[in-house]
Image (cartoon, rainbow, N blue to C red):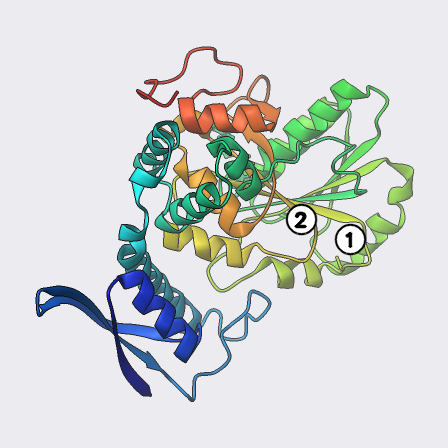
């Protein structure tokens, strides 16, 4: 390992030196601040492993599941936290307008991560006069669920166990039926082993006059897809994936490849910590166009996680769900709905915000 110590008058300056000289793979081994001849000096010791294997990309799951990837991810998260802690002084609130400052401080209290805060701060400085919402809209994308925005023939619902996959698939189907009563839609359940979800989907699909099918293997799935020209849309409901599994392999095993016209909808509820969320994103990332569906918003008390995950995963939010029932508990996402949720904790359709936070206007 190559180890080197850098000094400078600010931590930001020293980090820039580390990056310039040792590159993005450098690891911070230690840091200290001291006074020399009355001047404050910042010192960072950084290391670079010359024999390091290439940084795992989101596409590389080779080390996944044997502990190595998970440990690496944990370490990297810690390093990132340290880096951002060092860079926090770089956020000089005094350089923002009072309105921007209040909004940024509020977001930080609501759980928006240091990296998102810093990114937002830099955007605000780079575009003087821009509003915080303008900058946030560049960082968190919204693409409301509907046929126009999501015209794919096949829609696959994925996400952690119990995150609301089946409910979301049914809500989406009922919503499309409401928009177009003549729509022909078939559900394919790939979760054929576990009883409850299977029964729930079958029950609701049949009750709502949708076709219900099951496919536990590639051959059955291929047959269904070949015949699916008879319907306008095919909705595939899947099961959650355990640690060590990933959606790329899961979809490949069902013969769902890039040649097929597929959209993926990833259901997430805003309760996981940063490490778990990051791991979920890796687990459920595929090359298919993907949306984020935020579920169980009625159970959450703050929504900073929405900003962190949507920004980090770089996936558009397509829908918001906020109730255990199938009816009146879901809406396609729009920017005003998302930002009212984040800034006012206002659940869509509910006029009054929960514990409206002070001074965000
Ligand atoms: N409070 C609340 N409950 C919800 C919401 N969405 C779904 N649920 C409930 O969460 C539970 C799990 O929902 P499902 O749709 O079965 O979740 P799933 O991801 O398909 O679950 P598995 O297939 O078992 O992994 C059910 O009791 C739903 O009623 C929501 O937005 N708010
Ligand atoms: Mg289910």
Quarter that holds the N terminus: bottom left
- The secondary element bearing badge 2 is classed as loop
Quarter that holds the C terminus: top left
Is residue 345 visible to the viewer in this orientation of the structure? no
Residues under numbered marks 1 and 2 in contact, where contact means CB atoms less than 8 Å apart? yes
- Residue 165, labelled with which disc? none
Task: Say which residue label 2 marks.
Answer: 190
User: In the image, is 167 to the left or to the right of 38?
Assistant: right
Within 10 angstroms of label 1, few (less than 14), some, or many (20 or more) residues? many
Pinpoint residue 68: horizontal percent, then vertical percent: 41, 74
Within 10 angstroms of label 2, few (less than 14), some, or many (20 or more) residues? some
User: Which residue is located at x 69 percent, y 63 percent?
Assistant: 253
Depth check: 317 or 71 in front? Answer: 317
Q: Locate residue 357: give its quadrant.
A: top left
> Mark 1 or mark 2: which comes first in sequence?
2
User: In the image, is 316 to the left or to the right of 44?
Assistant: right
Pinpoint residue 155: horizontal percent, then vertical percent: 72, 42
Depth check: 136 or 264 in front? Answer: 136
Does ligand 2 reach within 8 Å of label 1's beta carbon? no
Pinpoint residue 141: horizontal percent, then vertical percent: 59, 39
Task: Say which residue label 1 marks.
Answer: 221
Depth check: 109 or 352 in front? Answer: 109
Pinpoint residue 340: horizontal percent, then vertical percent: 48, 23
- The secondary element bearing badge 1 is classed as helix
User: Which residue is located at x 27 percent, y 62 percent?
Assistant: 11
User: Which residue is located at x 34 percent, y 74 percent?
Assistant: 27
175 relative to 33, above or below: above
User: Which residue is located at x 62 percent, y 47 percent?
Assistant: 238
């Amino acid at each position: 390992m190559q180890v080197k110590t850098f000094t400078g008058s600010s931590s930001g300056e020293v980090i820039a030196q580390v990056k310039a000289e040792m590159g993005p793979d450098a690891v911070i081994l230690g840091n200290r601040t001291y006074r020399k001849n009355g001047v404050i000096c910042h010192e960072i010791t950084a290391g670079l492993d010359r024999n390091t294997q290439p940084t795992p990309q989101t596409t590389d799951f080779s080390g996944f599941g044997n502990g190595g990837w998970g440990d690496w991810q944990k370490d990297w998260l810690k390093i990132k936290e340290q880096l951002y802690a060092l860079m926090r002084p770089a956020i000089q609130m005094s350089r923002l307008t009072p309105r921007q400052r209040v909004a940024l401080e509020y977001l930080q209290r609501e759980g928006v991560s240091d990296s998102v805060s810093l990114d937002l701060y830099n955007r605000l400085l780079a575009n003087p006069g821009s509003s915080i919402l303008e900058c946030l809209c560049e960082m968190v994308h919204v693409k409301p669920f509907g046929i126009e925005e999501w015209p794919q023939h096949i829609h696959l619902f994925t996400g952690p166990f119990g995150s609301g996959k089946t409910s979301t698939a049914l809500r989406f189907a009922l919503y499309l039926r409401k928009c177009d009563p003549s729509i022909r839609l078939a559900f394919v359940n790939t979760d054929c082993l576990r009883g409850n979800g299977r029964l729930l989907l079958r029950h609701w699909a049949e009750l709502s006059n949708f076709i219900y099918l099951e496919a536990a293997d590639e051959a059955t799935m291929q047959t269904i897809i070949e015949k699916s020209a008879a319907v306008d849309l095919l909705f595939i409901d899947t099961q959650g994936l355990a640690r060590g599994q990933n959606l790329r392999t899961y979809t490949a095993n069902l013969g769902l490849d890039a040649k097929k016209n597929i959209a993926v909808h990833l259901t997430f509820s805003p309760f996981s910590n940063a490490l778990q969320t990051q791991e979920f994103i890796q687990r459920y990332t595929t090359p298919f166009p993907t949306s984020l569906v935020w579920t169980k918003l009625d159970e959450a008390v703050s929504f900073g996680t929405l900003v962190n995950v949507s920004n980090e995963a770089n996936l558009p939010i397509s829908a918001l769900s906020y109730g255990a029932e199938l009816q009146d508990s879901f809406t396609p996402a729009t920017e005003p709905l998302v930002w009212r949720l984040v800034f006012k904790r206002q659940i869509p359709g509910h006029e009054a915000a929960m514990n409206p936070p002070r001074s965000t206007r």
